[in-house]
Each structure stands twice: as C-alpha cells, then as structure tokens.
Amino acid sequence: MTPPSGRSANRGVDLAAPRVPARRVPGTDTHERARRSSPGTAWLGLRGIGAGLLFATGAVHLDLYLTGYRTIPTIGALFLVQVVSALALAIAVLLTGWRLVAAAGAGFALSTLAGYLVSLRTPLFGFREVRTTAGIAAGVIETIGFAALVALAIRPSGAQPGKDAAGHRALQRVLQRVPESVVARWIAGAVTLVMAASLALSLAATSAKPVGSGASGARLGVRTIAGVPVVTDARGFTLYWFSQDSPTASACTADCLSYWTPVSGTPAAGTGVTGTLGTIHRGDGTLQATYDSHPLYTYIGDAGPGESNGNNINLNGGLWHEMTVSGTT
C-alpha cells in the first residue's frame, strides 16, 4: 500500500513541514565566548598594570629611603610609610581587583605626586626636593599608575563579576554607579592630564643644578644655631662639610650638586671666624672655598638664615655636618 504523500514510510514524519532551526545555547558559539571573555581579560591586564606600577613607585621610594632619606627628620618616616603603603596596595589590587582598593591606589599615586611637586617649590617638613632621575621616574610612574587605577575603579558594571567582597557592597554600589556617568570619565581623564602637565611644568621650571653659592671672595660669618656657633656664608646660610671629601678634592658631583651647592671662590673671614681658610680646584676647574681643610657647601633644604636642616643626614653617599667654628667641638 502506498503511504500518504509527504509522509515517511517508516517514521511517520511530515517531510513537507517547515524545519525548525536548532535552538542556540547561549555561550556555545566560539565568537560569542571570545566577545564575552575579552573585556574580563582586558580588566585583568589593567589590574596587573596598576599593581605593577604601585610596586615600582614603592621600589623607587625604598631605594631613596635606604640610600639616605631615612636620616632626614620626618621625611624619612614618611618615605617608609609610602613604601609600606605602596606595596600593600599593590598586593591588594593584584589579588582582589576591588573597586575600593583601586580607588585607594589611585588616591595614593595622586597624593604622592602632589607631595613631590610641592617639595620642588618649597621645603616640606624642612626638606626641599630637587629634580633628579629617580624623582622624574617616580613622577611618571605615579601619573600612569593613577590613570590605570582610576580606570579600574570606575570600570563598567559587570566587567569583573564576583570580585567585590560582600563587606564592601554599600561602597561598591556607589562606585558601580560612577561608570554610568560620562562626567566621571571626563573628570578622571582631566585629572590625569593635569598631573602630567603639572609634572612637566614643575620639572621645566626647576633647575637640575642650583647656581653656586657666593662669588669670588665669598665672605664667611658666624651664627649661633641651637647653642652652637656655626660658619655661614655672606647671606647667613649654614655651611656644611661632607664626610666623603678629602682636603684636596670634593666627592660631591652629579646629582649630589642638586642638593649641596659648593661655596665658590676664595673665602674671606668675617667677624668671629677663626680657623684655616683655603680653596680647592673642582673637576670643572672652578675654585671651592674650604674651612679647616673641609670643602664648604650650602644645602637646598635650608630656606633661610638660622636653619641647619642638612646637619647629620646621610645623603648622596655619606654623612653631612654643619661647619662649626674651629675649636668649639
């Protein structure tokens, strides 16, 4: 017997009926999986960059701390706090990726750079910073680090699901609303540009090597500081000697000269100045004044007469001391 038209003889299926396309299971398509996973991969990479830059700025400050800043009053303690904070934030950003931690890291980078820029202009806690290779590197790292971390903090909602701790849900909900605002992104970008411009302008306006103190025939004086008679230049600024110098040569060169300015020319004794005056020839052929066979310097951290912020600090490879009047110590 012939089966009805359009029917399968052995299955009873209507071959003429339209075919229903197979149902697509979400996430099974290769291109769709790649599209969904790529944002998470990008944010994970940004997390690594932000953490790495925090580690880098911490390493720069640790090097400066160990090579002399630890002996500077207040500044030494602040540098140690910066080192510990940078490393702790770097580990937290790397392991958690929480928005709140990323925001804290961005704030740390911003405040550290701000402190550096302020100290380039005026003494901060009695210490004035100068333009050095380490300082420039740290400033660049902090600017880029801020940009990476603030981007991580205001990333789109759902970019890293499940990464925020339940204990921070209230703050996280606030931060999750931030990415929805275009204004927030503009503000973050503007702050980054301001940081970069401020760093560039400050470095351009700050001389890498101050002009030498005094002129040919510099006159020395005496001022009592903390009960001790100290030798000063003609302006009344405290003079210092370096433990690494010899009676015939100065060991302060390159970046050292950014902090310690040689007293140039042949010295002349003012009222109360005793001891032996002399000169040495520096590597560039200029004359530097000496007192009791010690080449003399002023310190950039002293803002005016009567200050001796450079006394007994270990900086630029050795100890520095205020030059006391001969026979008083």
Image (cartoon, rainbow, N blue to C red):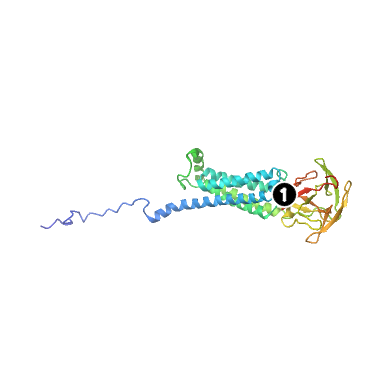
- Left or right of 160 in this view: 88: right
In the rendering, at what x and y percent does residue 273 appear? 87, 48
Q: Amino acid at mark 1?
A: Asn
Whether residue 85 is visible: yes
Label 1: which secondary element: strand
CA neighbours of label 1 inside 10 A, class few (<14), some (14 to 19), many (20+) = many
- Left or right of 118 in this view: 9: left
In the rendering, at what x and y percent does residue 156 appear? 48, 47
- Left or right of 228 in this view: 205: left
Q: Nearer the viewer, residue 189 or 222?
A: 222
The quadrant of the picture occupied by the C terminus is top right
Whether residue 193 is visible: no
Q: Quadrant of residue 287?
A: bottom right
Query: Could you tell me which residue is drawn at 66 percent across and 49 percent down?
Result: 66
Q: Nearer the viewer, residue 79 or 178?
A: 79
Q: Nearer the viewer, residue 321 or 45?
A: 321
* Residue that numbered label 1 is attached to: 314
The quadrant of the picture occupied by the N terminus is bottom left
